[in-house]
Image (cartoon, helix red, strand yellow):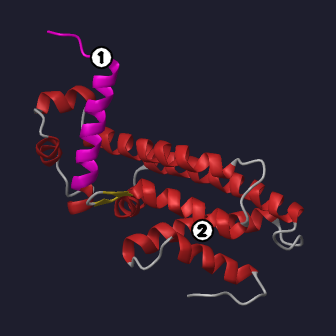
Amino acid sequence: MPKISDDQRQARRDQILSAAWKCFSRRGIHATSMEEIIREANLSAGAVYLYYKGKDELILAAISIYIQELRALLLPLLLREEPFSPAAFVRELTKSIVSHTQRNDLDLNVVALMVWSEAQSNSRAKELLAAAQLKYRDELTAVVRKWQKRGDIAPGGKPTSIGRAMLSFFLGFIVQSAMLGQIDPDTAAKGIEGLISNRPLSGG
């Protein structure tokens, strides 16, 4: 048999994960069977099980890849030596979230809610998600300190408290996008600017 390259192996893993996300989005994580994922991936059972031993392993892989891909988009924004202004920061971060979660006919915001629910009974999933959120919280706190030093926001607030509130805001953006829609990066940025600014804003 011809040898499969590393790129081909990765492409096959991506194909299986994409199929899993589509199935999870349609039917939910627990209602989805491996047989449905195999059909969606248009692969043989043997080909799928070569990469993932079962649905539990596939769920953890899907969570891990989702976290890694999103973090790769957000980290350059979080670690900028001179951060964007608060409103621009919110706009750029939420734009990155949208670019990651909206994939053709698939909304990964919906899958994210399912994953958060899964974490309540799956200790490994909770560990993965909690580790990622703690990093974001620390990085947002560091951004807040830079804003205070530059005079973008009032200096009296406790950076750790503001960082936690900012994390809640971004998690809430994902929830509202999945449940209600009607929010986009410009709206989110205007909302933050309205909270911290004393001057009138144009538009809704």
Q: Quadrant of the N terminus?
A: top left
Compared to residue 1, the image places residue 18 above or below, namely below
Question: Pointer 1: what residue?
Answer: 5
Q: Quadrant of residue 192?
A: bottom right
- Dot 1 amino acid type: Ser
Instruction: Give the residue at x 53% y 48%.
Output: 73
Disc 2 residue type?
Ser
| Secondary structure state at the residue bearing disc 1 | loop
Q: Based on the displayed image, in which of its 4 quarters is residue 31 positioned?
A: bottom left
Tell me if I can see residue 28 in this picture.
no
Front residue of 137 and 82: 82
Extreme bottom residue here?
Answer: 200
| Relative to 200, 148 lies left or right | right
Tell which circle, 1 or 2, labels the residue nearer the N-terminal end: 1
Which residue was labeled with disc 2? 168
Which percent across, then down, holds residue 39?
Answer: 11, 44
Residue for point 54% across, 43% down: 72
- Asked whether the beta carbons under mark 1 and mark 2 sit within 8 Å of each other, the answer is no
Answer left or right for 72 relative to 161.
Answer: left
Q: Could you tell me which quadrant the C terminus lies in?
A: bottom right
Within the magenta stretch, is there residue 189?
no
Q: Nearer the viewer, residue 122 or 165?
A: 165
